[in-house]
Amino acid sequence: MIGGPVCLLGCSDGAVVALTVALRRPDLVRRLVFGAGVFHRDGWAAGVLEPVPTFAPIRRAAPETR
């Protein structure tokens, strides 16, 4: 569980992932650092750069005990 916004660091494909997280969930990202990423609008899958609606957080069940 994350207690609040975090700093994200991404390199290469990780930079693309970090940017996507920041675009889709800016409430979870305090700072964004990326390097060696290729960023341009051509080549992205349809809808990736579009805003998405905010969804309720996923509630995970407590681990089973045996």
Image: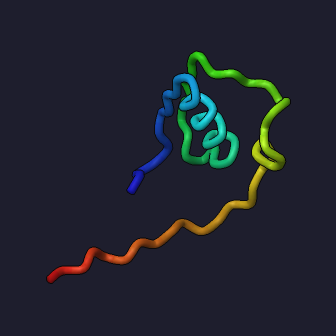
Number of marks: 0
62 left or right, relative to 27: left
Q: Tell which residue pokes out farthest to the left in this image.
A: 66
Q: Position of residue 34 (x, y in %)?
A: 57, 22
Q: Where is residue 15 in the image (x, y as percent from the top left)?
A: 58, 28
Please determine whether, in this image, residue 15 is positioned above or below residue 50.
above
Image quarter of the N terminus: bottom left
Image quarter of the C terminus: bottom left
Q: Position of residue 64 (x, y in %)?
A: 24, 79
Q: Position of residue 25 (x, y in %)?
A: 63, 48
Task: Look at 79% across and 25% down and name the residue there.
Answer: 40
Task: Look at 63% across and 39% down and name the residue there.
Answer: 22
Please determine whether, in this image, residue 1 is positioned above or below residue 20.
below
The picture quadrant where one finds residue 20 is top right
12 left or right, relative to 63: right
Q: Say which of 39 and 28 sits in front.
A: 39
Q: Say which of 39 and 53 sits in front.
A: 39
Task: Look at 85% across and 30% down and name the residue there.
Answer: 42
Q: Tell which residue pokes out farthest to the bottom in this image.
A: 66
- Look at the image and name its color scheme: rainbow
Please determine whether, in this image, residue 57 is positioned above or below residue 50.
below
Task: Look at 69% across and 21% down and name the residue there.
Answer: 38
Q: Say which of 43 and 60 sits in front.
A: 43
